[in-house]
Amino acid sequence: MTTTYTVKGMTCGHCVSSVTEEVGAVPGVTGAEVDLATGRLTVDSAGPIDDTAITAAVKEAGYDARSQQRGRP
C-alpha cells in the first residue's frame, strides 16, 4: 500500500534525511521517499498505516504533514 503526504517546512537534504529516518521507524512502514522540491512524502507499507503515526513521526522530525492519497502497490 502506498500513501502520499505533503510535508511543510523542509529546506535541505538534512530535512529530507530526518523525515525519512523518523517515518522509516514507524512499525509497518517498508519504505519512505521524500522529494524536497515538491514536499511530497511517499510511504510504502505491507498494509494500512495509521495516518496519525506518520504525521507524528514527521512532527518528531520537526515538520508538518498532511495526507494526500492512498493507493495500492
Image (cartoon, rainbow, N blue to C red):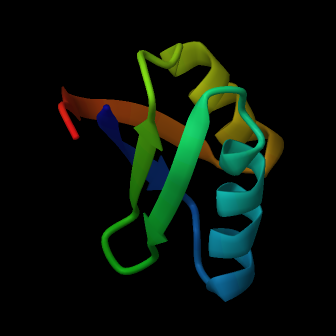
Q: Quadrant of the N terminus?
A: top left
Residue lying at the far front in this picture: please name it: 46
Q: Residue at x 45, y 76 (%)?
A: 36
Left/right of residue 47 with respect to residue 28 in the rendered view: left
Q: Position of residue 11 (x, y in %)?
A: 59, 79
Q: Is residue 25 left or right of residue 2?
A: right
Quarter occupied by the C terminus: top left
Relative to residue 23, is residue 1 depicted above or below? above
Residue lying at the far bottom in this picture: please name it.
13
Give the percent coordinates (x, y) of residue 17: 71, 72
Is residue 53 shown left or right of residue 9? right
Residue at the image position 41 percent from the left and 33 percent from the top: 66
Q: Depth check: 14 or 1 in front? A: 1
Residue name at image x 47 percent, y 63 percent: 33
Task: Please name the residue shown 65% across and 60% down the image.
Answer: 20
Tell me if residue 54 comes above or below residue 23 in the rendering. Answer: above
Toward which corner of the image does residue 53 lie, by quadrant?
A: top right
Left or right of 68, for residue 50: right
Between 34 and 32, the one lying in front of the other is 32
